Each structure stands twice: as structure tokens, then as C-alpha cells.
Image (cartoon, rainbow, N blue to C red):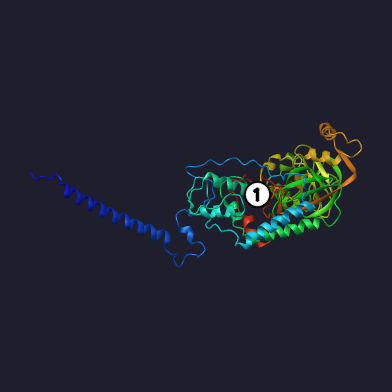
Amino acid sequence: MQDVTPTPRKAANCLARVLSIRLQRAGAAALIVATMVFAPPSSNAGSDTWWDGIQGFGTPDFSGKRTTERTPIKPDVVNDLRPGAVPYRSEEMIAFIDKAIVQYQAIANKGGWPQIPGNRMMRPGDDDERVPLLRRRLRATGELKGSSSGFEDYNFDSTTEEAVRRFQERHGLRVSGRVDQPTLAALNVRAEERLKQLEINRQRIFALLQQPIEERYVLVNAPAFQLEAVERYEVAQRHRVVVGRHQRETPELRATIKALNFFPHWRVPDSVAKLDVFPRLVKEPEYLEKEKIRVVMNDFNGPEIDATAIDWSTADSSKVKLRQDPGPQNALGLVRIDMQNEHGVYMHDTPLKTLFDQRARAFSAGCVRVQDVFKFVSWIAKYEPGWENPGQVDAVIEGGLPVDLQLTRPIPVYFAYITAWAEENGSVQFRTDIYNRDGQPFAEAAKAVDPDAPPPPSGGLAP
């Protein structure tokens, strides 16, 4: 019988051979990995997308879904109203923006911040080769404090998540802590373009200051989806608003609030009737009865006619008019704020209150819907005879009858387009260029879609 018990020398030689084989295999594996990671792009690959072939940059995934979610997404609490009493339309705001311009000029002079390649979402808990670049980008504008310690790992940790959340707040984005498509697009707007955006908006605010500041006025900033009621040079109230959607933009204008209409009829504008309501009635003729809309001829005070006798596919909106009865179903809600202007837009209540819970609120046909509108109209009416009592508006609503208040002290109103500004604490704010008025560099960021945002409302008939 052969003795197979190893001697110490044999055991040592055997161990050496095993280690040698393992090192050879490990070296081959390392060479394969190095080839995969550092090999130059193939000739048919786009030079600006070669990183998509690297593990970690992967194929686009903005579905917001994974088989296993490392970190559950935190709910977005919408607290997007400006703080403090300083109005947009003020010399103080000009001074704040001037400081921001100096800050961003300094960043641009140093070369700006890095671009983050690829387009795959980054989530807290991920290991991603782009995380060091993300941290550098966030340090450039102060969302991430401190400086790099040299080595940067690839882990998307909680500190980075909180910095992303601060960035999203500052840019009016849904606050998720994830680098989703809209966040990545905003991160990659170059420093020079942000500087130009601040300069453009300084000019817009300066133009608003070219006439004396009124004792009381209202300013709606469409890209920020908010309204300021200003009295004695300070903001008395702020309200979230819904503004015009794509191709139904809320215009820039100056008008005057002259009346409040409680329990109004909605006189459906010809454009809304032609583009929205008539096509819907072809498929859903019962919509008129459900929404208590009457069909009248020639003008809104004309005789009512039988809706079943009309071919809605060929109806002429210049002759066939639609008028919705007052009530909780009315598209204007329970109060309309009358401010005659060449664009035919105004402010009003809405039955769709849940829309104010969304970050992006461009859903209307051009008019402005106001959250907590009864508080706002109480401020409008408080110097009118008989309306000094703060409870007067509530009493009218409880009465349930149409009331028109003609103002003895009309109030100027401005619809403005301000996508960048700064606050007293030094925070520089940017908003999505929803109507593409800031120039081409911001167009791509405006197109970015958030997969986890609530869906837009259906119908879209309200003004």
C-alpha cells in the first residue's frame, strides 16, 4: 500500500503549486475586468455615450421600480412658498440677486462644476461610479458641505442623499433624495447658463420696478406656481397656484382687479369650447348634463337650445356657446376674481383642490387657480364698505347665492415670469423654464419627466 501521507517538504511544495495556480487565475480575471472597464469605445459607439457600456451606468431606468428597494422613498412634503416678507418686486430682491450673480460668476471663473454622465437613476444605497462627480457638483453650490478628503467611494450614502434633497428644494423639484431624470438634467445645467439665467431674471424684476410701487398689489409668478399679495411693501399673504399648461400658457401682463364674483357662471371661452369641450362631446354627450353646462346661441345671455340637435363634430364656437351653472361642480369653483385684460385670463377658485399638492402645477388653460382662495379674496375686499369684517366672505359662501362685489379700491395685478431669484439668507433659487422663455440651454431640462410624480389631471377643461 502506497504511503500518501505528505511530508512537510511535500506539503510545502503542494501549497506553493496551489497558490501559483490561484494567482494565475486571479491575474487572468483581473485582466478581463480591466479590459471591460478601461477598453476604448468601439468605432461604432458614440463618443459621448461610451460610459453607458460600463456596469453601473447601464441602460436608462426611470421607472422608479426595482425588484428590491434599498431605501424606501420618503414622501414629498410640498412647502414651496417663499419665506419672509420681501416681495419679488422690490429693490431688496435686486440686491439679493446681485449677490447671487457675484457668487455664480466666481464659480464660472473657476471652471464651473462637473457634468454627470449617463442617464441611469441614482438612488440612496446604490454603488455608482458617478457618485464622486455628484458630490463634487453638490459641493460647488453648497448643498454638500466640506471639501473632498481625496479618496471618494462610490456609495450613495445618507449625507449625499440629504444634499440631493437640498438641491431639489432649491430647484423646485420633487424632493425624493434620488437623482432622477429631472434632477440629473438640473444638475447638468452649466454654471455659465445659471449665471445667464440670474441676469435674465434680474432684468425681468428690474422691469417690474419701472413704475411706482402701489400701496397694495398682487403678483403671480407662473414658473414658481405662487402668488404674493403685497401691502405696504411687504408680503401679506402667499398662495400656491395652478397656471397654464403647455400651449395654454399663462401670459405676462399687468391688469387691475375690479370685482369679485361669488357663485359665478363659467362662460366657456371659445378656444376651450372648440379645442376641448366639443371634441369631448362627440364621444361623451352626457358630459353636459353631468357638469350642468347649458348650450346657448350667439352669446352667453342668448336663448338656451337643445344640445341633442347639434353635431358637435362641426359645431361653430362663434355661434354655439357653453355656460356652466354655479355650484361645487363649476370649473371656477365658488369665486371668480375679475381682472379684465386682452388675454381673457383671470384668477379663481377650483373644485380640484388636490392639484395644489403637486410640485409642478401647470394644468390650466391659462387662468390662475388659487389655493385658500377665500382667505385671498378676504384680503382683496377688506377695505370695501360692509366687508371690513373678516367673516363676511364666509357668510356669503354660506348664503349660497350669487353676489358680485364691485371694488371701490381696485388692485393692480401682475402676472410675471421669474425662474431665478435669491433669498435674504443667501439661498439661490431656480425653477423649471416651463414655457421655454429662458433660451435653449434650459429646454432639455424642462422636458425631463419625473416617473414618480402624480399623473396630470384628466379632462383639462377648466380655465
* Residue 348, quarter of picture: top right
Mark 1 is on which residue type? Arg
Q: Which residue is mark 1?
A: 170
Viewer can see residue 336: yes
Whole-percent x, y for residue 322 in the image: 79, 46
Q: Residue at x 87, y 33 (%)?
A: 389
Viewer-proximal residue, 195 or 452? Answer: 195
Give the crowd class for mark 1: few <14, some 14-19, many >=20 residues within 10 Å. Answer: some
Q: Residue at x 35, y 57 (%)?
A: 30
Whole-percent x, y for residue 212 in the image: 86, 54
Secondary element at image label 1: helix
Count the numbered circles shown: 1
Which residue, as the protein is rendered here, is positioned at the far left? 1
Whole-percent x, y for residue 399 in the image: 84, 32
Q: Residue at x 71, y 44 (%)?
A: 81
Quarter placement of the N terminus = top left
Viewer can see residue 325: no
Residue 67 is left or right of residue 293, and the answer is left
Residue 121 is left or right of residue 95, and the answer is left
Q: Is residue 433 above or below residue 322?
A: below
Whole-percent x, y for residue 355 in the image: 69, 42
